[in-house]
Image (spheres, grey):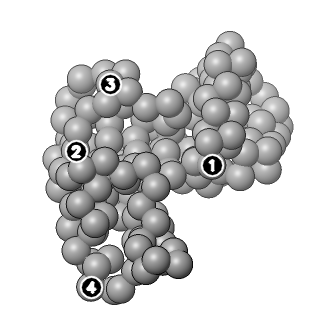
Amino acid sequence: MHPLDVEEALQTLTAIVDTREQPTLQLTKRLECFQRYERATLNAGDYSGKVCVNGGWVQLPVAIERKMSVDELCNNFCQQRPRFEREFNRAKENGVRMYLLIEGGNWENIYGGHYLSKMRSRSLVGSILTWLSRYGCQILMCNRKLTGQLIWDVLYYEARTYLLGMVVDETGQQDSSGAVDC
């Protein structure tokens, strides 16, 4: 894809926000960081994105699973583990790159056990590192105030990388598989 075409497509970047994200003040603040967004049901994660390429919309093969705290992540690794595994397995099977974003998390507090859950620190560290290995996901941790901007930036650079990697087929047409009219 030509660099000018990439820039044009990036101007259409639209965040997709899962309909299960609760309409809270925090969500409203996150949405203010997005240039464009729409609500839709996602198969994996809480956020994804799409771009318009050659007149067709293409959903990016990326999803961001947001956790509001280390304690919520502990709950997913303990009580909700089967559901959590199914979500990440679906993403992996569909070639979707997953990001696990933990608001207010940091390795010092995780290793030190400075969270409310009774999950042992070593178990939490082991679960996180196993998840990274098993599902090839990326982990992000940030202050809640930065969540919206970080989500938008991840989607932007994932879109840019995706668009730069698009191949031209033997007829000279770009492969925009899965595209629907813009």
Q: CA distance from mark 2 to mark 3?
A: 12 Å
Residue at (27% x, 85% y) in the render: 4
Q: What is the distance, in whole Å, between disc 3 and disc 4 at their CAs?
A: 33 Å
In front: 161, or 115?
Answer: 161
Q: Report the residue marked by disc 1.
A: 95
Type of amino acid under label 2: Tyr
Distance of label 1 from label 2 (alpha carbons): 23 Å
User: How many labels sit on residues?
Assistant: 4
Residue denoted by label 2: 37
Q: Nearer the viewer, mark 4 or mark 2?
A: 4
* Amino acid marked by disc 1: Gly
Residue appearing at x 20%, y 67% in the figure:
11
Closer to the chain start, of discs 1 and 3, is 3
Question: Nearest the camera: 60 or 101?
Answer: 60
Residue corresponding to mark 3? 19
Residue 95, above or below 24: below
Mark 4 lies on residue? 4
